Image: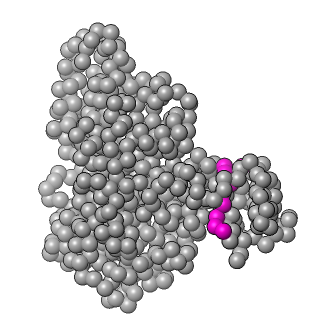
Amino acid sequence: MRVQLFVPQDTTALALGADAVAMAIAKGITSRGLDIDVVRNGSRGMFWLEPLVELKTAAGRVAFGSVNVTDVESVLDAVERCVAGEEANCPLFLGASESIDYLAKQQRLTFKRSGIGDPLCLKNYQKLHGFKGLEKALTMSGQQIVDEVKTSGLRGRGGAAFPAGIKWQTVLNAPAEQKYIVCNADEGDSGTFADRLLMESDPYQLIEGMVIAGLAVGANQGYIYLRSEYPVAHNIMNQAIDNATKAGFLGKNIGDSGSDFFLEVRLGAGAYICGEETSLLESLEGKRGMVRAKPPLPAIEGLFGMPTVVNNVLTLGAVASILGEGATKYKDFGMGRSRGTLAVQLAGNIKRGGLIELAFGVTLRQIVDDFGAGTFSGRPIKAIQMGGPLGAFLPESQWDTPLDYEAFAAIKAMIGHGGIVVFDDTADMAAQARFAMEFCVVESCGKCTPCRIGSTRGVEVIDRIVSNQERDNNLILLHELCDTMELGSLCAMGGMTPFPVRSALTYFEEDFGLSSRGDH
């Protein structure tokens, strides 16, 4: 068995010096005359341990982290001891990779291959049961594939949580000469990075899911709309598409099935609003990214006026697992109408940030305590925001709410894309509420008045409340303004901006200077 050392090449690991570590390891291997291969893999998502260096041994993989350039010599000493069957005797030694508690406690379906090997190696992907779902899909009719997705209970992981099978059924039933599959990879919510991690660590899974979607609804063209801030993912996806095309998993006559599917990556231009599906479609068509009025739905009239499936990276990635392992197995995870697993992204003021994949039903408190190990600052947690910049700020009384779409909707919150941002007790929640309105000012497409004007007025009204200018009247005005935005906006940009504002007012009133007066 060849001795291999794995050094991640995803964006987070690179930002923490992984390239320099990999170069130092390669140099050390040469100077020592060792017969060891260095493999650049994807991250396992344990970001507080990056760069995480792993050694493949006969007994499995063992890890060292986090490794800096100055640690390389001691790590290589430990590697030589491990290869010789001796104790590692290294302060950075973490033991078996799969036994690290952060990873061991997870239930990985979508991210089961993340970090296992070279993300661009087709043989590695197939060895880990990749394209198993596509092989099965090629033997099924479009309706059978759609039925399988329906049975799984998969809901869109982009935020709206709409049942994926129903969306696909609508596109399948729509008569048209041309249909499209569009992947929304414009991951712009605060505290989110799961889409990026999947594309950088397991790109063929996304490709496989998109091909399956094309077979399901009769589409032969797909587009990945990728945010411009992801250059590493852009490079990896383009290489993966090229490799998959040459291997016959993309392009004409996939697997000698007679079916075609072509795939391209298109870069966004930094507009948060293009994460909204109709604005994204406008951008793909070469227009300014502005929200379309619905109906018609994109499933009926989407890209270039044709029936279009628009799903995000995690949704399409899950499809590959569902077809490969079976809808029933996927459905066995979760609770209520929230089936399968959720990719939680833990960020903000947190000690152990990273990606956590678990079945729906776990609570925020369990995530933050068991995985995050509390705040990075060591101070008490004050608030948790989930669902991106439009998500509500949750006080401690709500941290035991199970991660379930309906349970969160019941408390006027949302799971969204699964991003969690933690704030300690020094955070000013009035400033955060103001930021929510200001964010909407900057990122609104400007098409509808409640969002465009309402957010501008919202910033002004919050400023007056905090400075105690006609506070009672301005509190009334702010609530009315939130009602107008929530009920009158064309899309979630304006419609959900009131969520963080209302929650901050309700649960952190002292930050607005209200508690001493008993105002609510």
| x and y percentages locating residue 271 in the rendered image | 37, 48
Report x, y in % for residue 335: 29, 54
Examine the image and state in which quarter residue 473 appears.
top left
Residue 93 spot, x, y in % from top left:
70, 53
Q: Residue at x 33, y 34 (%)?
A: 398
Of the 4 image quadrants, the one containing the N terminus is bottom right
Is 276 on the left-hand or right-hand side of 118? Answer: left
Instruction: Give how far across and how far down residue 215 sits, in percent.
Output: 29, 78
Residue at 17% over, 75% down:
176
Residue range of the region highlighted in magenta in the rendering: 59-68
For the C terminus, which image quadrant? top left
Residue 467 placement, left or right of 201: left
- Quarter residue 268 falls in: bottom left
- Is residue 180 among what the camera can see? no
Instruction: Write the residue at 14% across / 59% down.
Output: 296
| Residue 63 painted magenta | yes
Residue at 46% in and 75% down = 130
The answer to which of 518 and 183 lies nearer the viewer is 518
Determine whether 466 is above or below 390 in the image. Answer: above
